[in-house]
Amino acid sequence: QVQLVESGGGLVQTGGSLRLSCAASRSFSSCYWYHQAPGKQREWVATITSGGSPYYSDSVKGRFTISRDNAKNAVYLQMDSLKFEDTGVYYCKADSTWGTHWGQGTQVTVSS
C-alpha cells in the first residue's frame, strides 16, 4: 500500500498563489491532482507521469504547474493566479504496483 498525505492548503486572496504537496510513503508511477468544489463532483486537475510529463485540465492550464521529486516520493501543485472557483478540497491520487491510492485532501479557500 501507498499512503498519501496532502498539505499546503489554506486561505488566499484572488490572484494569489499556493503550493500543494503530496507526500507518499512509497514510490509510485503516475500521480494526479483532483479538485472538489463545494457541492460538486470531484474533477481532474492535473497529471504527472512517471517520466515527468505533465497534463492539465483546461480550467487550470497556464495557471497551475505540477511537478515531482522522485527522491522524496513527492508531487507538488503550484497554483498561481487563483480564482474564487478554485476553492475546494484538493486530492492527490497515485498509481503504484499495489493499485490506486488517494490522500485525505487539503482545503483551499480563495476569497474574492
Image (spheres, rainbow, N blue to C red):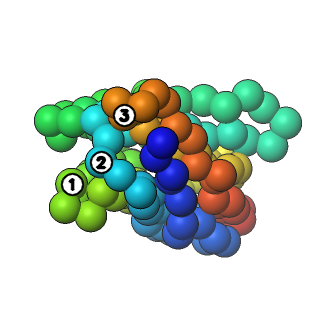
Element type at mark 3: strand
The three-letter code of the residue at mark 2 reads: Ser
Decide: few, some or many residues near mark 3? Use Cα within 10 Å; few <14, some 14-19, many ≥20: some
Which label's residue is closer to the chain start, 3 or 2? 2
- Which callout, 2 or 1, points at the residue further toward the start of the chain? 2
Residue beneath disc 2 = 27
The percent position of residue 9, horizontal first and vertical second, equals 59, 66
Q: Are marks 1 and 3 in contact (CB under 8 Å)?
A: no
Mark 3 — residue? Answer: 96
Residue under the point 21% across and 54% down: 70
**Considering depth in this image, is 66 or 80 the residue closer to the camera?**
66
Badges 3 and 2: C-beta atoms under 8 Å apart?
yes
Q: Would you say 11 lies left or right of 64 here?
A: right
Residue at mark 1 to residue at mark 3: CA–CA distance: 13 Å
Q: Label 2: how many residues lie within 10 Å, few (<14), some (14-19) or many (20+)?
A: some
Residues at discs 2 and 1 in contact (Cβ within 8 Å): yes
Q: Is residue 7 above or below residue 30?
A: below
Query: Mark 2 or mark 1: which is in front?
Result: 2
Residue at left offset 53%, top offset 59%: 5
Residue marked by disc 1: 70
- Amino acid bearing label 1: Asn
